[in-house]
Image (spheres, grey):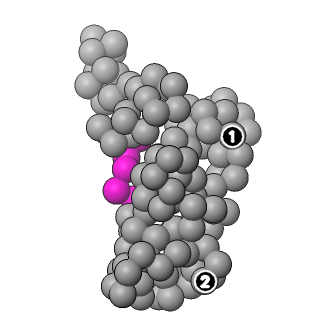
Amino acid sequence: MSSHTTSLNPCLSCGACCAHFRVSFYWSEATAKGLPENLTEQINTFFACMAGTNDPHAPRCIALSGQIGVAVACQHYEMRPEACKDVEAGDEKCARARARHGLPPLPTAQDHAATAQ
């Protein structure tokens, strides 16, 4: 993976959110998106989560490959639940997930604007 690619999408060299948050969603979303059953865990009658993310001590999505903070990829990116889209690069959730893995926060749009002046 080139550094140009990861500079355009810092998520490709991070993955911290996929190994920090429980990715839960209404159970039928997995079926609608075509997620294989072995990639999800039932939480209760109405909700499921991505397998591996329900562990409160060491969550890590089963669909995440690679090393956190180095190079990662979602093996089922096109089928990922909407909850996966709740974290955006550089937002508060991103910073919290990165901190858990010893990574510094990403620069925000405001940081980029300040350095451009």
Q: How many marks?
A: 2
Quarter of image, res 70 = top right
Does residue 93 appear left or right of residue 62 in this picture?
left
**2 or 1: tag closer to the N-terminus:** 2
Residue 57: percent from the left, percent from the top? 50, 47
Circle number at residue 67:
1
Quarter of image, res 5 = top right
Residue at image position (56%, 38%) is: 14
- Write down the region rendered in magenta: 85-91
Residue 39: percent from the left, percent from the top? 61, 73
Does residue 91 appear left or right of residue 55 in this picture?
left
Badge 1 density bin: few <14, some 14–19, many ≥20, Cα 10 Å: few
Considering the image in quadrants, where does the C terminus appear?
top left
Quarter of image, res 81 = bottom left
Residue at image position (37%, 50%) is: 87
Q: Which residue is mark 2?
A: 37
Residue at image position (41%, 84%) is: 27
Considering the image in quadrants, where does the N terminus appear?
top right
Say which amino acid is labelled 2: Glu
